[in-house]
Amino acid sequence: MADSSYPPARRAWYAVAVLAIAYIFSFIDRQILSLLVAPIRRDLHISDTQMSLLMGISFALFYCLFGFPIGRMADSRSRRNIIAAGVFTWSLFTAGCGLAASYLQMFVMRVGVGVGEAALSPPAYSLMADSFPPRRRPLALSVYGMGMFIGAGLALVLGGIIVARTGSGGTITLPLLGLSIFPWQFTFFIVGLPGLLIAALVLTVREPARKEKQSATATPVSAVVTYIRQHRATFAYHHLATAMLSFAYYGATAWIPSFLIRTYGWSAGRAGLVFGLVVTIFSSLGILCGGLFCQALSRRGYRDAHFRVGLTVALLILPVGMLYPLMPSPWLAVAMLIPYAFLSTTIFGP
């Protein structure tokens, strides 16, 4: 299909920029918990296991479950509007975490964040696919993907600063409302409420014309299942490998700030600042380089460029992933975390 059938480059890249901003805020809202472990555990009287459930299954399970029906909806309805509704939803629930006074309430709010964020990537990928020709998509998807690591890094830096200034506990009183809350609860208002403005910004994106043949309804589920069955080996290996890499990366990064604090005696502020900068800079570079590498291989005629990138990354990440927890000093651990952060995210670009 000729490039002229796609939106002008300026409009396409504007859409990517807005979607990347939304992705940044989604990861700020998602990752802020990793630097608030200590005050949340203290004030809600919960264990490390319960904290892990807040950072993991309460979000991830419903994020995955709702991804499929929302993706189906994006096949036939306005992708822009679905994304805007999702941003509005997760921002509202993130702010709602600031009102949680018990573990159950916090769990429910995190479920809401997961459901809202499930409405971003499936329609975003579809929208970008209809905005760029195939040869230009890896770079566009990588720029969008950078948002997750910029957001995760900013969450760590912001969370570290806030914890450092409010680590002594106590409460603060909200002006006008007269409501007394813990300082960490106020953090959720700070990071959540601006997302309502991002939802309005998403509505300024112009929906591109769909390149696939249109019909009155979306592709039947049976046809989707049949396609997956016909290519079951590819789907199985790809999904299993990506899931394992994601499991290693997200599982580790959720606890790395606490690892630096508990193992080396760092303050939350230092752990958040240092690891936040590592994630922001090197994870963002990783996903960008992954897209560029894949694009270069594709131009050289490799139809399996995406898989070659994934295999290379999986092999290179093993040594640094095993070494950083064993380092005798914090700065040696950080030195190992730099290539770990870079390599772990390279797979997400393609």
Image: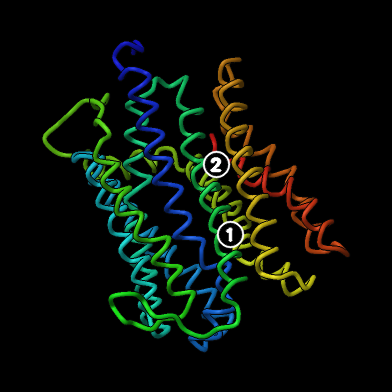
**Other residues around mark 1 within 10 Å, as few (<14) / some (14–19) / many (≥20):** many
Closer to us: mark 1 or mark 2? 1
Q: Position of residue 335 (x, y in %)?
A: 80, 51
Q: Is residue 241 above or below residue 322?
A: above
Residues 169 and 221: in front is: 169
Residues 199 and 53: in front is: 199
Q: Residue at x 58, y 48 (%)?
A: 241
**Left or right side of 32 for 12:** left
**Other residues around mark 2 within 10 Å, as few (<14) / some (14–19) / many (≥20):** many
Residue at mark 1 to residue at mark 2: CA–CA distance: 20 Å
Label 1 SS: helix
Q: Quadrant of the N terminus?
A: top left
Task: Name which quarter of the figure residue 248 lies in.
Answer: bottom right
**Which mark is drawn over residue 348?**
2
Residue that protrudes farthest toward the bottom in the picture: 45
**Which mark is drawn over residue 156?**
1
**Left or right side of 170 for 8:** left
Amino acid type, mark 1:
Leu
Q: Earlier in the sequence, mark 1 or mark 2?
A: 1
Q: Position of residue 276 (x, y in %)?
A: 63, 54
